[in-house]
Structure formats: structure tokens, C-alpha cells
Amino acid sequence: MLSITLQPNIDSHILFVGGGAVAERRIGLCIHEACCIVISPVVTDQIRRWSEMGLITWHKSIFKDVHIEILKSSRLVFICTNHTAINDELESLARRYKVLLNRSDNPLACDFTVPSTLNIGDVHISIGANNGGPRVNRLIRQDMTKRYSELKIVMPRLKIIREEVKLLIPRVDERQQFWRTHLDEIAFQAILDGDWPLIEEKLHHAISGIRPKS
């Protein structure tokens, strides 16, 4: 099964059939990366707000034959209804027209999964539990958010230090050795444990040792 990380593409659209909580979560992953079209007679309040804001296109209807052209031209289709018979029909249509599908009620029928994303400052993490379920993804997100929370403060400082090191050490192999020496696994764990000021001090001390002497 493919794990797809969506890249922005305004020239294609993604189809969502169904407007419940599952569809809302899927749309939330895609809304800034592609044009999203929702076909459902009823949607959640959030999906309705996205539609009112012009962020998605909502067809307030059950899936009908007139919608087949939308499905045929879709980049991907998410099947998110609670009706097995409808989902079976949609899966059959998607396979007939060779559109990759994700079916919420049958993980084995999915052609792809879309990992959820976690942003902690400048750190961007994709999370996928191979259809282990939204609860597993949620627990992983909570754990990683807590585990890497210090990086939100640390990364901007590290970027400044990195630029300074690049100026002082022109050779790539020597810079790599500098970071292997001064930012190893032990130092990284210390950062996660909240000891960034100590690691930052050690990095500045190491940098001072390679600055040209006046």
C-alpha cells in the first residue's frame, strides 16, 4: 500500500464522498495541498465553514451519476460514507476509472494512506500507523508533541549557530565532523530533557575554539 505525502497542486482536485468526522479529518490533511471537492447531503460544522470560506467545494447531494465525471478526473478519492453498498459502488467506479482510493470502512481496499502531520516549530513530522486507526495516530501525535516540545525553542537557535559554523568551516566533511562531535545522541537527548542552555553553551565554546585569533 502506498503512503502518500501530498504536494501542493492547484491544477488537480481530490474527491471526498461523505461529510462526517472521518471526512473532516481527511480534508484537514489535504485542504492546503489541493482543491477539495465534497459530495454529501450533510456535513460537519467544520466542513460547512470551509465551504463558506471558499476553501473547498461542497455538493450538497448524495453521489449521483452526474458526479461520475468529477470522480473520473480526481487525483484521489476518499470514500467516507457509512453505507457499505454505496462504498462498494464507489470503490468499483474508482477502480474502473483507475483513480486511487482510500476507503474508511475497509482498510484492505485502500490503495494508499495519507500520514498525518505534526508541526513543532521548524520541525515537520509525518505520522502513519499503517491503518492502525485514528486512535493510534492520536496517541503517537500526543507522545511526539510532548517528547519533542523543546525543539520549538531550540531549532531557531540551532539555525543561527549552523550558519555561523558554515562561515567558519567551509569544507562540508569538516562541518559534518563538527556536528557529529558536538551534537551527538547524548547531546540531543539532553536537549529533549530541557538542557538546551548547557548544550548551547558547549556549542559556542566549541565555535570560539575555531574562530580566527585576533
Image (cartoon, helix red, strand yellow):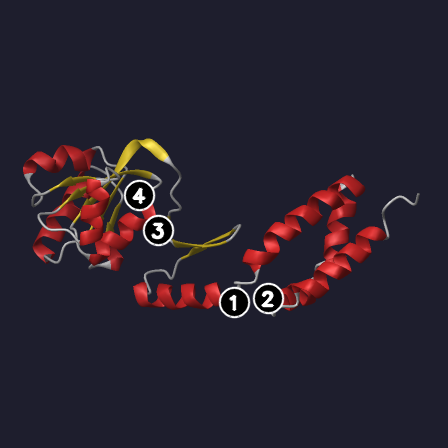
**Mark 4: few, some, or many residues within 10 Å (few <14, many ≥20)?**
some
Which residue shows up at 38% across the image and 37% down it? 8
Q: Which amino acid does label 3 sit on?
A: Val
Kindly identify which numbered label has been placed on residue 192.
2
Mark 4 vs mark 2: which is more N-terminal?
Answer: 4
Which residue shows up at 26% across the image and 58% down it? 108
SS at circle 1? helix
* 104 relative to 74, above or below: below
Residue 144 position, x and y percent, is 47, 64
SS at circle 2? helix
Q: Which amino acid does label 2 sit on?
A: Leu
Which residue lies under the disc numbered 4?
A: 31
Which residue lies under the disc numbered 1?
A: 147
Mark 3 vs mark 2: which is more N-terminal?
Answer: 3
**Number of the front mark, 4 or 3:** 4
**Mark 4–mark 2 distance (CA, rounded to whole Å):** 32 Å
Circles 2 and 1 in contact, beta carbons < 8 Å: yes
Mark 2 vs mark 1: which is more N-terminal?
Answer: 1
Residue 118 position, x and y percent, is 43, 55
SS at circle 3? loop
Q: Quadrant of residue 188?
A: bottom right
* 10 relative to 108, above or below: above
Q: What residue type is labelled 1?
A: Arg
Kindly identify which numbered label has been placed on residue 114.
3
| Left or right relative to 40: residue 160 | right
Which residue shows up at 48% across the image and 67% down it? 146
Is residue 118 at all visible to an observer of this figure? Answer: yes
* 206 relative to 65, above or below: below
